[in-house]
Image (cartoon, rainbow, N blue to C red):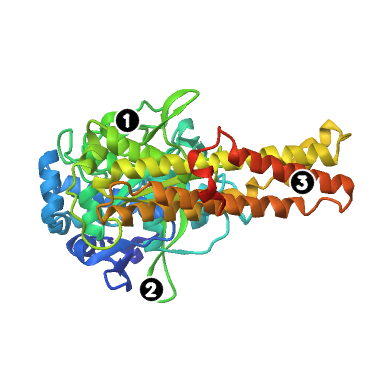
Amino acid sequence: MDDLAEQRPRWDPRYQPCIPTVTLDGAVAHHSLCALLAEADALSTINCTTPGETVAVIEYLMAICFASKTCPSSDEEWRAWNVAEHSLSGASDWLTIQPDQEWDLFSPDAPLGQNRNLAPEMPESGTGPAQLVIEHVGDYSQHFDHHHLERGDTLPAADAFRAMLTQHVYAPYGRARISGKNLGATVTNLAAGRLLGRIRVVALGRTLGETLRLNLYPSEGTGESFNTSWTSGSIERRTFAVKAKPRTPENSADLHSALGRSVLLHPARGAHGQAMVDRVLIGAGEVLELDPERDLQDAAYVDTTAGRKPLRPSPSRAQWRDAHALYGAVMEAPTGMYARLRALPHERKGPGAPYQMWAVGLLANKTLPVAWTQGTYPFAPALTRHLHRASYRGSKIAEYIADSLRRAAVIASETAYPAMRAADGSAQLARFDGRWEFWPAASVPFYSLLDEVIDAGAVDDDDPVSAPLVDYACTLMKAARAHLAHRLDSLPPNDRGNRARARAQQRFEDDMNSDKAPAELRGETAHD
């Protein structure tokens, strides 16, 4: 980085408008970190390019709040903060008095969020800045669109800053595109970010300020450790000569600002003198030893064949099908985030749900990031039990209908092609399987079901779930019939084809009226 000498731009996110936001009146703006915290209750939300980037920024803002001691000291104070809409301006004030050199993204000595020790490797191993962006980085060898990482397009400093934050928390494991001959062989061993591989749940309020207050918590640990860079602060960093030993975060500020990657950004000037990044380096970062009770308070657990595990993003199972795990956590958690949410006041603050639970995960195929997955689930403390019932029954109904579509497809395939070779079985079954249209279409009625429960609960309905559940079941069943009919249209218009169609449709109807079917699917109401 020293080659720029006095021409090196200085860029400080405390004062530069670097975070996309939405104001309460719907206007889109960009705020600096200081402005964001000072005006948090006048902003609706953060509006970054991807869900993961938004989560990474929220994590960073939480770290600043913890470092500045702008956080509750107990669960009781947490509740009082949320009831009274406690200001977060103290975090903004703290930011303004921090040493300028510690918040310079392009500092030659301690670049913000980076490891200056990578600098000697930049001439040989530096790549185009797309390597910094998780959605483009691929397996650190190629982009998703197969453009090589050597492409030299510059990246605005604000975009690079947010992408770096996302790398620190979500980056996948793999091998770094950097030589280990000088820094040590383990610099190439990339560990997975602390949020990769699980669903991160963020409680959302009606303003950004409320969102931050909902997710702050009584901090544990000592000091005010905030990771401004690899070479500053009191934390002893790992070296790359030997395999990293996981370290325990010193406190909440340390946890939420941990440097999950060794990153170095090379500064450049844009056509109009603006700060840009033209080259990047990425190597191994910090490895943390997390305490599930203290450090994974937002994790919702589900039962798996390997035991009880945090809810994970899945390429084959839509996230909403496990939404009941979130509501179950609120009902059952003895301590932590979900217990605090359960203790919130029951009063409503306007139409719709007073809060939302936003679940975000990154789907990855080993070292290759694939897609972000997300879902937003309405939450009202007084209706937690009802929302859990609706989401649990809604998932069971959808799964039963999907299984019925599969069974109908099997009947159609076996009847139409009785002499089919075993090798052709899967392809023929897929031809008649309506599940592939059914699952994507079922999500909209599911979210509508939760909204209806919220609306029914607002008028003191003793049972705000049963009627919406029956309507939901009827909607899914009608949609499934249409998907099955569409799949069966490919049958030949002859006797065997007609017989296969009739048998498949009858099997589906028999399933809908079976004693094993969810109660909401049986009876005259569901068949209207």
Residue 160 found in image quarter: bottom left
Label placed on residue 216: none
The amino acid on which the numbered mark 1 sits, given as a three-letter code, is Leu
Instruction: Tell me the SS state at disc 2.
Output: loop
Q: Residues within 10 Å of mark 3 (few under 14, many from 20)?
A: some
* Residue 119 vs residue 493, the one in the foreground: 493
Instruction: Tell me the SS state at disc 3.
Output: helix
Mark 2 touching mark 3, by CB under 8 A?
no
Q: Earlier in the sequence, mark 1 or mark 2?
A: 2
Q: Residues within 10 Å of mark 1 (few under 14, many from 20)?
A: some
Instruction: Look at discs 2 and 3 and give the one toward the viewer.
Output: 3
Label placed on residue 502: 3
| Vertical comparison of 357 with 366: above or below | below
Q: Residue at x 59, y 41 (%)?
A: 512
Instruction: Look at discs 1 and 2 and give the one toward the viewer.
Output: 1
Q: Residue at x 61, y 54 (%)?
A: 148
Describe residue 72's horizontal placement relative to residue 238 as left or right: left
Q: Position of residue 210 (x, y in %)?
A: 21, 55
Residue under label 2: 273
The amino acid on which the numbered mark 3 sits, given as a three-letter code, is Ala
* Residue 200 vs residue 195, the one in the foreground: 200
Farthest-out residue, bottom: 272
